[in-house]
Amino acid sequence: PAGFLDGLVHPLAGPDHLAAMLAVGCWSALTARRIWLAPLAFAAMLLVGALMGLAGLNLPAVEPVIAASLLVLGLLVAARTQLPATAAAVLVGAFAIFHGVAHGAELAGGGNAWLPLAGMLLATVGLHLAGIGIGHTVRQRNLWWPRVAGSIVTVLGAALLIRMV
């Protein structure tokens, strides 16, 4: 059965989830007045999606939406796009549901899911905080650093989407 450590490592093991969570934090640090709102929405909706996945609920096109989330989040970082706080939270929250469903489906059938879920949420928050740190760092360098960071995430998302076609 999966334990706390399994959940803690899980978001770090997949480049798609890792990049998305770092991008959310980075984008928030680059553009938001309320830096915590989008990462909090992502973490909350990730939990909702994980519970859906654990319950056996499926959403269509989970993997393509995860790849598309990287594409979109990377572009938002690269362009330093500012959105109203609520719109940013809704956007990342919608993507997080799909990330959560994928995580939950992977954890389903493992007995007690609360420990791996707790680990997954802790890792998610940690990745958002790391992304915020990256965002603060690149914001103070020059205009090209955010573009480079966002472009890397965008290319990863595009490559994942192309691989699915």
Image: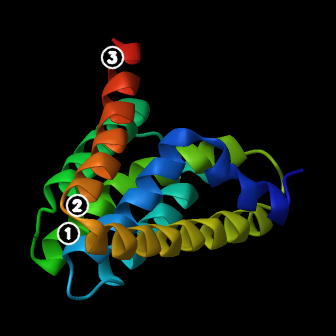
User: Residue 49 or 35: which is nearer the viewer?
Assistant: 35
Q: Which residue is mark 3?
A: 162
Relative vertical location of residue 138 with respect to residue 157 in this rendering, above or below: below
Q: Which structural element holds mark 1? A: helix
Mark linked to residue 88: 1
Q: Identify the residue at image location x=53%, y=51%.
A: 18
In the displayed structure, does residue 74 sit left or right of residue 6? left
In the displayed structure, does residue 116 sit left or right of residue 15? right
Q: Residues within 10 Å of mark 2 (few under 14, many from 20)?
A: some
Disc 2 residue type (three-letter): Leu
Q: How did the renderer colour the structure?
A: rainbow
Marks 2 and 3, the one that precedes in the sequence? 2
Q: Which structural element holds mark 2? A: helix
**How far apart in space, not on screen, are marks 3 and 1 (Cα)?**
26 Å
Disc 3 residue type (three-letter): Ile
Q: Are marks 2 and 1 in contact (CB under 8 Å)?
A: yes
Q: Residues within 10 Å of mark 3 (few under 14, many from 20)?
A: few
Marks 3 and 1, the one that precedes in the sequence? 1
Q: Which residue is mark 2?
A: 91
